[in-house]
Image (cartoon, coloured by chain):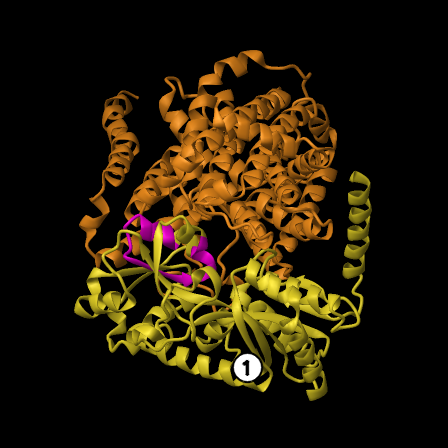
Chain colours: A orange, B yellow
Amino acid sequence: METFSLLAQGFAVALTPTTLALAVAGCIIGTMVGALPGLGPSNGVAILIPLAFSLGLDATEALILMTSVYYGAMYGGRISSILLNIPGDEPALMTTLDGYPMAKAGRASDALVLSGVASFVGAMLATIGLMFLAPMLARVAYLFGPSEYFALYLLAFSTLGGIASDNQRKAALAACLGLAIAMIGLDNSTGMGRFTGGNLHLMDGVDFLVAIVGLFAVSEVFIFIESHGRSSAIGVKLDAITIPFKDIARSFGTMLRASLVGFIAGILPGAGASLGSFLAYMGEKAWVRDNSQFGKGDPRGVAAPEAGNNAAAGGALVPMLTLGVPGSGTTAVLLALLMTLNITPGPLLFTERPEVVWGLMAALLIANIVLLILNVPMVRIFVKVLSVPPWILLPGVCMVSFVGIYSLSGSYFDLLLMIVFGLLGYFLRKLNIPTVPIILGILLGNHMEDSLRRAMVISGGDWKYLFQSGIAIGFWIAAITGFVAPVFLRRFLKKPQAHKA
Amino acid sequence: MKQTHLTRLAAAVVLGLGISSGAQAAECIAPANPGGGWDFTCRSISKIMYDIKAVDEPVQVTNMAGGGGGLAYTHVVTERADDAELIVAASSATATRLAQNAFGGMTSDQVRFLGAIGADPGVIVVAKDSPFESLTDLMDAVKADPATVAFAGGSAVGGFDHLKVLMALGRAGFDDITKVKYIGVDGGADAITQTIGGFTQAMTGDISEVVGFLKAGDVRVLASFTDERLPGEFNDIPTAKEQGIDVVAVNWRGLYVPKDISDDDYNKWADALTAVAESDEWAEQMTANGLAPFTRIGADFQGYVDGVIEEIRTLSKEIGVIQ
């Protein structure tokens, strides 16, 4: 009951005309930031911080604007994933797998509406979870040390092979390439730069966005030029806009399961929205009985990652607010914003600054409803993008990507690196090697290596340390029985059939 | 209400356009993205300088992230060496990286350090139920068997948080510093989480990183690395010095300027910074951000930085971060 009265106070803060206007503006900006390749939620929020100061917003208002942008970007990322096969930001990566095939089959608006609803369900459940359970859930972070994190990343990594439905060896190769790229930059465990060639630009490692835009958008341009514009992947059929009630009903269970998985991934500091959407997708693929359509345009494959990444975005606010530990790049920027506003997130935030916390919760609920209203009817406008001929659309998308990437650090080096990734993406596509596992390799590689090496430092090099807690052992068992063993079993079971053929 | 915001928005847009058209006003480079410590240094110092009329024109803040401050450093040294209208945010991390040659061969004598006007005191923290009651207890445990104590901190191996522990151990008479267990995690709060969770035995960081957990009673601070006890509510935290371990390690917040500017220009900035240090506005900012007074400006500061760099270089060689 106490929660409700606190929430009522929160609504009193969040329902003033100013804050409401800020929430709506934040949602619109966020959706655009998310949809434009090269502009992700974290740099979108970072770019807006100086604006919040020059507007003279107070703490609650600034926080409401920024979190609306954050939630909005999570919604927006799916748009370019589905329509262009170019993820708008890294959490939207998994949505390309089934979203784009759906669009190609003439169901672009169905995919957009469905993913919009899935985003809403994920974000709503996560916000409710945040409201009722945040102080309790904060303690979960105390249960996760290096060996538990290593086991978690290992579980995620062991599912990578299952991403590509046709050629697992090529997917594994791509994942290894991603791991190799992840090694570039400062090594936390020795304080030395690795594979940087003495170049300061590489000290911070390769930014996901640079890799994503290069591998997906720039390589698309190369292929487009090579075929003189004939074999463009872009140019899906337009369809009439209806609400796909059947798909929504069919994937409702998916949305709930994916939200839970995403929310838990979000709560763990260091995992974040990308891991949330990834685990939600792979978990769903393993869960449903008939998964033969996954990767070919299964509506559940669109609903799962979108519910997952939006739930993870809400979940990531738990450690950020209750511990001051950012769970993702964007929450790190939000945390920095809070500190600048003289709010110290931590165990006392909920008791010391209830007006900030509950104003934020109320604003999140409002933002979520605004986003659903914006996103579902506005599908009509988004889909219009597809009626633009590819020879205008593609260079346009590319130009926006260049500006977005340049804004990351204001250096031309990232642009060059992006073109290198574009070339890499072009050759990999020619060789039929999937590019999604590369990004996941980059994403998981750093965390996985850091956790392992921290565990080794703490234990003095004793490998048994990795299996000393129930949580870690649980992840190991799930990884082995759920994902590694089936690969071998399948081969064993399939052999006789191969002989017959 | 909404009207005022719209006016402010319009003003911000106009201001933004002014910046992008490259107006010739003084500039403060924050070598990181908006929101971090360096960004705070630039934004608050620039604002106060103009508010108290220590400068005639507003100082514009530019963010230039990359290479842990290395990109901005290279930019200043190679392209702006005689720009008298430029100040750059710096901290202990800048000195650490310079000492460890992490700025691509750039050295500390290629800029002039202007001054520091506040510092985040270094602390050693343990979980509330830890068996260690004092810094001496902790140091004794490491001396007895370094494998039993793991430290967590928010910077990489060889970073300032790691070095603070090594300095303390060195003063306590433990020299085998490569045996000391240290894990660098993503930020101070994460390091505390690992320590409360029992994965590491102690956390090394800055007081501003531990305030929330300290007030909630989840952690105890064993020592602060300051000359004197911290003011106000932290007054009951003993210093390392009191416990016989003579280490002062603070994360100072300050500025450097390009090398080839005239002494007049250098002194002009030094005066403006002194005025900020003495202002009530800055005192407020320091309290709000958990900073302790730490004012060293001009030649005094240059000497301090040179000394710190020398000490860090020696330690870094011992732990193998540099040759």
Q: Is residue A342 magenta?
A: no
Q: Quadrant of residue B247?
A: bottom left
Q: Is residue A442 above or below residue B263?
A: above
Viewer-closest of A316 and B202: B202
- Specify whether residue B203 is painted magenta: yes
Can see residue A87? no
Q: Is A129 above or below relative to A189? A: above
Residue at left 39%, top 56%?
Answer: B185
The residue positioned 27% from the left and 21% from the top of the image is A497
Q: In the image, is B174 to the left or to the right of B51?
A: left
Chain containing the residue with disc 1: B
Task: Classify the position of the C terminus of chain A by image quarter.
Answer: top left
Q: Residue at horizontal 63%, vertical 83%?
A: B259
**Which residue was labeled with disc 1?**
B301
Residue B98 spot, x, y in % from top left: 49, 76
- At 62% from the left and 42% from the top, the residue drawn is A60
Residue A31 as seen in the image, left or right of residue B145:
right
Percent from the top left, x then y, of residue A73?
60, 38
Which segment did they paint magenta?
Answer: B191-211
Where on the picture, by quarter, is residue A467?
A: top left
Q: Measured from the top left, where is residue B240 in percent x and y? A: 35, 72
Percent x, y of residue A291: 40, 21
